Amino acid sequence: MKNYFITLILFSICTLGFGQEYFNKKYKIPNKITFSDSSSIYLKKITKIKFKDLTDKEKDSIRNIFPLGSKLNYEVEKNISGNKIKIFETIVIDEEFYQKQIIEKKENVLRTGIKGFVKFDKNKLTVNPYLIKDKYGDFGKRDVYYYELKNRQTIKLSFNEWTVSALTIPIKYRFKNKDDGISEEFTTDFNANLFIGKTLFGKTSFFHRKDVDNITNTYNLTGGILLGTSTVKLNASNTSAANQPLDSEIEHTKGLGTIGLGLSYSYNKINLGGFIGWDYSVGDNAKKWNYYKKHWIGFALGYSLFKL
């Protein structure tokens, strides 16, 4: 039996996945991440504040940079007779100038339970939160949040997503049944299957390296259901447990419908999947098949079988 399972796994390396679609991937975004050395990184946002809403200290800081009554020279680009020309203009600092100022401030995000989508660029992991309706049926303001990473700093975020993949399982192991006189069997018939799964545990690590490429690694455990079709050739050998087995010179090709469960683990583009399923033959004499409604197991080891 041990040798059978080793053979099964080795043959399953040739399993291929194709036609993948992925839906509704959302990361869980904590507003604070604490590292093993007790240091922390905070989720931040940029808030635009009008001059009138600043503190007195912040107002004084602006007034010191641009004293009342002083002149400010600045460059503008204008279109004159179809030509773009840069010219200098001058304004006199007055109270109206102060009131027009809008200051951008970095603030820690206090909101919890955030889910959203992310983009990793340079030292910034940008978060676009998933919008939900409030009690008034309004989606509210669309803020954009971010983490700022130091050089060689890593943060990890959990996520969930749905996966739909078309795949084939080239080897199935069918169990023996001593009471019915059914022997164990490996089958290699062509089969086409649809795997519909949801992430049970998914996490992505974001590693920032200053002035060189960042590194992103994703690992994911997915569970789901398997639906498939294939064929089987019924003959005297694989109908031996029926009350009236087929004659030795008779052979029928029948369709099979498959239903099963699957569990896959992926790390970046390397994937390992295990499946258990039940096949149902269709047509005349279909129920004579020794493995009708009997469970089987199959394994899949492949490259980019499921999206990460």
Image: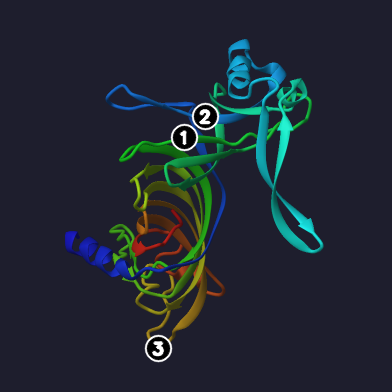
Q: Which residue is found at the position 58% from the left and 24% from the top? A: 65
Q: Nearer the viewer, mark 3 or mark 1?
A: 1
* Mark linked to residue 249: 3
Label 1 neighbourhood size at 10 Å, few (<14), some (14-19), many (20+)? many
**Which label was assigned to residue 138?**
none
Mark 3, secondary structure of its residue = loop
In the foreground, 97 or 161? 97
Say which residue appears at 30% left-offset and 64% top-offset.
181
- Image position, residue 206 (x, y; %): 39, 43
26 on left or right of 95: left
| Nearer the observer, 234 or 300 | 300
Specify how the rendered protein is coloured.
Answer: rainbow
Say what amino acid the circle numbered 3 marks. Answer: Glu
Q: Are marks 1 and 2 in contact (CB under 8 Å)?
A: yes
How far across and how far down the image is residue 21, in percent?
55, 59
Q: Amino acid at mark 1?
A: Tyr
Q: Considering only order in the chain, which callout, 1 or 3, is on the residue closer to the N terminus?
A: 1
User: Which quadrant: the N terminus?
Assistant: bottom left
The picture quadrant where one finds residue 26 is: top right
Residue at 62% in and 38% down: 130
Q: Quadrant of residue 247?
A: bottom left
- Please tell me whether mark 2 sits on a helix, a strand or a loop: strand
Q: Which residue is mark 1?
A: 147
Gap in angstroms between the C-alphas marked 2 and 3: 76 Å
> What amino acid does circle 2 point to?
Lys
Residue at mark 2: 44
Work out whether mark 1 precedes mark 2 in sequence or the reverse, and give the earlier one.
2
Measured in 3D between alpha carbons, the distance from the residue under mark 1 to the one under mark 2, in whole angstroms, is 6 Å
